[in-house]
Amino acid sequence: DGFPSGNGGAVLPRPPLLSIVCVVYVATDGTSTTLDSGEYAADTESEPGWLVLAYGSTGWPAIRDQANAVAITYTAGYGAASAVPQALKQLMLAQIALKYDNRTGPWGDALEQIWSGYRRHWHGCETVTV
């Protein structure tokens, strides 16, 4: 549980990544320290996104060798409604119509299978411990 080795980055699950809010780590002396935002960058183009070293950074700081020594808080999701994929919007409308028409019946298995491809369990700000 720490920073990636060398100049590597950390994968941030639950795409799409919008931004990194903060990176907090336990320094070798045991103090909880917030990493300066100029030392890292968010790779929002890759899916899933990544926490990477900023250009010109000297490397990840030394941390205490303990579980959960690094916590990354980030924001993920589509942001504006206009950024939500059209296929996902259509799927939502189909799901709503199915549930309305069959208020006492089961959900459609076919729709559930399609949902599984989009399901990311996003809940706003996500803290991932690496």
Image (cartoon, helix red, strand yellow):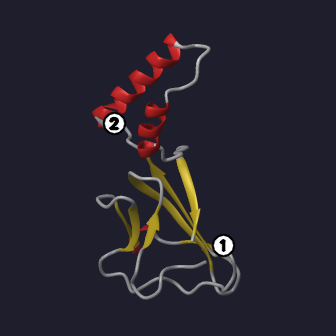
- Residue sitting nearer the eye, 94 or 86: 94
User: Is disc 2 surrounded by few (<14), some (14 to 19) or many (20+) residues within 10 Å?
Assistant: few
Residue 106, given in percent of the width and then of the height, sits at 58, 23
Residue 127, given in percent of the width and then of the height, sits at 58, 58
State whether residue 111 is above or below residue 94: below
The residue that label 1 is drawn on is: 68
Residue at the (71%, 81%) spot, across then down: 30
State yes or no: discs 2 and 1 in contact (Cβ < 8 Å).
no
- Residue sitting nearer the eye, 14 or 102: 102
- Sequence-wise, the earlier of marks 2 and 1 is 1
Amino acid type of the residue that numbered disc 2 sits on in the rendered structure: Val
Residue at the (54%, 14%) spot, across then down: 102
Dot 2 falls on a residue whose secondary structure is loop
The residue that label 2 is drawn on is: 84
Residue 69, given in percent of the width and then of the height, sits at 64, 76
Compared across the picture, whether 50 is left or right of 120 comes to left
